[in-house]
Image (cartoon, rainbow, N blue to C red):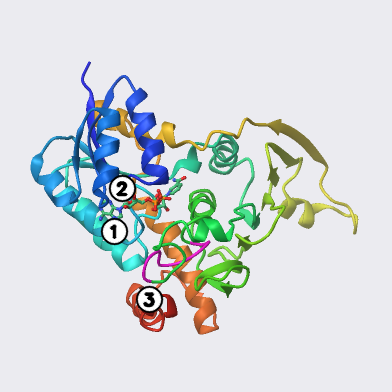
């Protein structure tokens, strides 16, 4: 059987999880590993019986793999990705595909017109709850979007977590906080399910719940092109957290919380009922369809298997890399709105945001420490 030879760049928390997954696949193998920390790279290579590198450019020159999986901190995704694509490799890049929209555009441009597979680790797209919601939306069961609310506050993180890497929770190292690192998953799903809003207004607490400089508490208002509205609430500082998604359409409402989901199906669409019903305070009859899902699996394996299937057999990607820009743009726009204190129109002006981020880095106490 033909096997996809992987090189994993960045051998930290998630790089090691991905290595375990790849090493167990029948149609893939670990061909090389790369990390800036030489001891770590060497130890990991010994574990998987493969070559190791401490400079990703040397790895690309060595030509020992078919595909690279980029699991470095956020800022490196753009340049490592561009170099890997230009060198002719298939690329699977961790989320967020880049720190900011301008970099994401550069990275996506490098993949354009190339034959290689270029995917992003948008792993929560494999969650059965969200697959079901996507079917309800795309199949028209939910009807036209009216309102979306997502309370996603179960990303609780301790001070020990923020201290676990010098790149974490700084403008220069991570480029953002809960929006860009943790709930970037839900921002991806939000764009995937509901499309992009046309305006956002964010209220972000910078270091409000931890001694960090980036945002760790966020409430955002979203305004969609058809007049639908949304509220997105997230934090890493609240326990116990909540993960409750409610999407209301003309034909009903879906409510997902934990492993349970209910689809409330209107027997008559709300718009039609409103204009045809002769009673003043009546509402459409509703059927409540209860569903339970197994949600423990984060979906990393499914994304890697899908990527391998795309390389070997041309399978359709679950997370094409170019779609990874939406969550980056939403994270950037919500933060930008909060920083400048006004509503932001989308598409976001990528250059303005990049300039703002550069200013945050220049003013950063963490940077000077
Ligand atoms: N999809 C998910 O569920 C998920 C979960 C966790 C992390 N992540 C993402 O994975 C990425 C890495 O996160 P992490 O928690 O594993 O970080 P980490 O700090 O644990 O590991 C990062 C590793 O990259 C190495 N590194 C840094 N720069 C490098 C370079 N230029 N070349 C080679 N190695 C380099 C570091 O030495 C370190 O070992 C981030 O983008 C993060 O957001 C995704």
- Which residue lies at the image location 52% right of the left edge and 64% below the top edge? 197
Sequence-earlier tag: 3 or 1: 1
Q: Is mark 3 within 8 Å of ligand 1?
A: no
Residue 224 shown left or right of residue 52 in the figure: right
Q: Percent x, y for residue 339?
A: 51, 80
Residue 18 is inside the magenta segment: no
Q: Could you say where residue 181 lies in the image, as x and y percent from the top left?
A: 47, 57
- Nearer to us of marks 1 and 2 is 2
Ligand 1 under 8 Å from disc 2 Cβ: yes
Residue visible at 68% across and 50% down? 244
Number of other residues with Cα within 10 Å of mark 3, as a class: few under 14, some 14 to 19, many 20 or more: few
- Above/below status of 133 relative to 224: above
Mainly helix, strand or loop, the magenta region?
A: loop
Q: Kindly give the residue lying farthest to the front in the view shown.
A: 39
Instruction: Looking at the image, tell me whether mark 1 or mark 2 is earlier in sequence order.
Output: 2
Label 1 with label 2: CB-CB less than 8 Å: yes
> Label 1 CB, ligand 1: below 8 Å?
yes
The magenta-colored residue range is: 172-179
- Identify the residue shown where x is 34% and y is 47%: 71
Q: Is residue 175 a member of the stretch shown in magenta?
A: yes
Residue 76 is tagged as 1
Q: Is residue 121 left or right of residue 30?
A: right
> What secondary structure is marked by label 1?
helix
Residue 10's label in the rendered image is 2
* Mark toward the start of the polypeptide (3 vs 2): 2
Q: Quadrant of residue 356?
A: bottom left
Q: Label 3 belongs to which residue?
A: 367
């Amino acid at each position: 059987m033909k096997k996809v030879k992987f090189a994993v760049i960045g051998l930290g928390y998630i790089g090691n999880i991905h290595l375990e997954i790849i090493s167990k696949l029948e149609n893939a193998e670990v061909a090389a590993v790369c990390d800036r920390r030489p001891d770590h790279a060497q130890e990991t290579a010994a574990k998987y019986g493969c070559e190791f590198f401490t400079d990703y450019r040397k790895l690309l020159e060595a030509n020992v793999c078919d595909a690279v999986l980029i699991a470095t901190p956020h800022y490196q995704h753009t340049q490592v990705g561009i170099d890997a694509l230009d060198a002719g490799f298939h690329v699977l890049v961790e989320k967020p595909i880049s720190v900011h929209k301008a970099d994401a555009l550069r990275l996506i441009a490098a993949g354009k017109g190339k034959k290689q597979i270029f995917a992003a680790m948008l792993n929560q797209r494999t969650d059965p709850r969200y697959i079901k919601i996507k079917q309800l939306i795309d199949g028209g069961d939910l009807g036209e979007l009216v309102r979306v609310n997502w309370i996603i506050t179960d990303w609780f993180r301790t001070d020990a977590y923020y201290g676990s890497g010098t790149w974490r929770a700084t403008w220069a190292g991570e480029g953002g906080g809960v929006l860009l690192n943790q709930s970037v998953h839900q921002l991806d799903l939000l764009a995937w399910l509901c499309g992009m809003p046309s305006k956002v207004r964010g209220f972000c607490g910078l270091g409000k719940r931890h001694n960090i400089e980036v945002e760790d508490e966020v409430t955002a208002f979203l305004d969609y092109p058809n007049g639908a509205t949304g509220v997105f609430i997230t934090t890493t500082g609240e326990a116990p957290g909540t993960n409750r998604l409610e999407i209301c359409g003309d034909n009903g409402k879906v409510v997902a919380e934990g492993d349970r989901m209910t689809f409330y199906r209107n027997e008559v669409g709300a718009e039609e009922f409103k204009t045809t019903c002769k009673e003043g305070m009546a509402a459409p009859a509703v059927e409540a369809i209860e569903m339970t899902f197994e949600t423990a699996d984060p979906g990393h394996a499914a994304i890697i298997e899908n990527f391998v299937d795309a390389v070997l057999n041309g399978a359709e990607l679950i997370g094409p890399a170019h779609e990874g820009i939406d969550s980056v743009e939403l994270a950037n726009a919500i933060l930008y709105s909060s920083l400048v204190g006004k509503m932001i129109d989308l598409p976001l002006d990528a250059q303005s945001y990049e300039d703002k981020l550069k200013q945050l880095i220049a003013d950063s106490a963490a940077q000077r420490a």
